[in-house]
Image (tube, grey):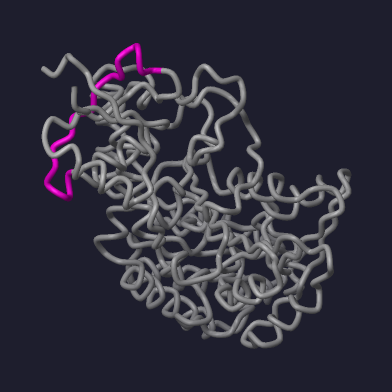
């Protein structure tokens, strides 16, 4: 199988990730730091090592500010529901995922409102103006994707975060599509919260996510329970990361995530991005040479996009195209990708798009195979349409 | 008796402190916190057999909260 569904989750994982999960499961699968025995201590050491590596990756000086969640959605929910209260207002971009939109929709019942700022691809000034125009006196939080999970368009998040800081508004970055491929520094930016998945560009297992936050902007915790600290007290501890990490953590997942982050650190996000961008550009160039193929963005470039290529073949249903590719051993994703707002912006809400996302494990040969298959498919369908064959999908 | 034990509120703080001391060439052993000191502790402590004062200074410099104590059992 040639796998291009890396926007949903990366596959394959580095062998070191698989080994780390197996070692944790087989060798020291105890409750981290809770129990006093040496297996528990070793498990706690692994969890801490991962915290340290993530702090290094995102330029945070204190590993205690790195909080493990179960995915990016949980991290985003923690911020959105922990920060916003009745009467508060939030601003999001027009490219947000449902992981942002749905919690905000749910919070309408509690008196929280939100506005959508339209993103203008290729015009950061217009995008920033759009955000600024949505600010109100009660705007408390801006939640913004770093790059669209459908179209790969990057947003000027450092500038938006700085604008928010100037206006006394908290800024939350959804880095689900960029962590591991785009350098992110909390130290050098005004980002208050960074939410990301562990199983995408960080190459960890599914069931891992990360929330990194500044110490002075703690949201309320969504869950309360055992933390292994202050056990005699009935109230949830305030200290980080315990406030947000109730219950037994996902040790095998975190062990794997640690190996994934080490994989990223050893290759560097810059080099991974450069490699994947070359592949993305190659696919874009090949597809743009096929008349029936619709592409929706400008040619991806490192400063403006991540290598997420969305396309369609004429008016054909995107799911049908993905099914055809699946029959030829190519895994892509089709449909709305849980981001209906983005499809409204690009006029693809009915058709959806076929999405191919690169990882470190793709190569040029795979790109050419995908592009050739799309080209052959288009030609075959044109021929069948010409002879009146209604069964145009192969 | 001089202090040779540091107790912490969270396991993450224990790990952070131990790593800081290691990087500064100070040996610290993670042990289960003695019962008499366990209240408010995460259950783990660092035993610092040598250069305790320097260790405490480092932790204070890096804003790592701990409570100093001494233990008779210094095996």
Residue A202 location, x and y as percent? Answer: 40, 54
Residue A328 locus on image (x, y percent): 46, 56
For this orientation, the residue located farthest to the front is: B1
Q: Quadrant of the C terminus of chain A?
A: bottom right
Asked if the stretch drawn in magenta spans residue B24, the answer is yes
Left or right position of A331 against A77 = left
Residue A81: x and y, percent? Answer: 71, 45
Asked if B13 appears above or below A150 in the picture, the reply is above
Q: Residue at x 75, y 50 (%)?
A: A84
Q: Bounds of the magenta span?
A: B22-38
**Residue found at the far top of this picture:** B35
Horizontal side of B41 relative to A289 (left or right) equals left
Residue sitting at x 36%, y 18%: B37
Q: Is residue A251 visible?
A: no
Q: Residue at x 65, y 76 (%)?
A: A163
Figure check: A121 above or below A81: below
* Residue A205: quadrant of the picture: top left
């Amino acid at each position: 199988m040639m796998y291009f569904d890396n926007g949903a989750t990366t596959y394959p994982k580095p062998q070191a990730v698989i080994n780390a999960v197996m070692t944790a499961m087989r060798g020291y699968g105890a409750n981290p730091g809770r129990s006093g025995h040496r297996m528990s201590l070793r498990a706690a050491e692994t969890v801490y090592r991962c915290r340290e590596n993530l702090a290094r990756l995102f330029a945070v000086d204190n590993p205690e500010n790195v909080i493990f969640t179960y995915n990016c959605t949980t991290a985003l929910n923690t911020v959105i529901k922990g920060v916003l209260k009745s009467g508060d207002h939030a601003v999001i971009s027009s490219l947000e995922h449902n992981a942002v939109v749905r919690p905000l929709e749910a919070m309408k019942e509690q008196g929280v409102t939100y506005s959508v700022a339209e993103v203008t691809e290729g015009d950061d000034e217009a995008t920033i103006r759009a955000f600024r125009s949505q600010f109100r006196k009660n705007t408390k939080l801006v939640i913004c994707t770093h790059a669209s999970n459908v179209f790969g368009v990057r947003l000027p998040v450092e500038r938006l975060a700085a604008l928010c800081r100037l206006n006394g508004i908290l800024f939350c970055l959804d880095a689900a599509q960029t962590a591991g491929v785009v350098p992110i520094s909390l130290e050098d930016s005004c980002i208050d919260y960074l939410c990301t998945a562990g199983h995408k560009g960080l190459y960890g297992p599914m069931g891992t996510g990360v929330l990194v936050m500044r110490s002075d902007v703690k949201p309320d915790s969504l869950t309360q329970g055992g933390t292994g600290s202050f056990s005699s007290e009935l109230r949830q501890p305030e200290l980080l990361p315990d406030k947000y990490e109730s219950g037994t953590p996902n040790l095998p997942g975190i062990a794997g995530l640690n190996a994934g982050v080490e994989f990223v650190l050893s290759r560097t996000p810059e080099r991974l991005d450069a490699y994947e961008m070359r592949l993305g550009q190659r696919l874009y160039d090949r597809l743009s040479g096929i008349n029936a193929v619709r592409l929706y963005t400008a040619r991806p470039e490192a400063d403006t996009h991540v290598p997420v290529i969305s396309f369609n073949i004429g008016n054909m249903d995107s799911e049908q195209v993905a099914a055809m590719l699946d029959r030829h051993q190519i895994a892509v994703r089709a449909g709305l990708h849980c981001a209906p707002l983005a499809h409204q912006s690009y006029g693809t809400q009915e058709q959806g798009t076929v999405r191919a996302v690169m990882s470190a494990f793709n190569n040029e040969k795979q790109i050419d195979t995908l592009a050739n298959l799309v080209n052959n498919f288009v030609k075959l369908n044109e021929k069948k349409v010409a002879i009146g064959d209604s069964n145009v999908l192969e | 008796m001089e202090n040779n034990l540091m107790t912490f509120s969270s396991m993450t703080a224990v790990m952070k402190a131990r790593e800081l001391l290691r990087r500064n060439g100070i040996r610290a052993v993670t042990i289960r916190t003695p019962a008499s000191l366990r209240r408010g502790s995460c259950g783990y402590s660092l035993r610092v057999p040598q250069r305790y004062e320097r260790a405490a200074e480092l932790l204070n410099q890096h804003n790592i909260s701990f409570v100093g104590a001494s233990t008779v059992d210094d095996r």
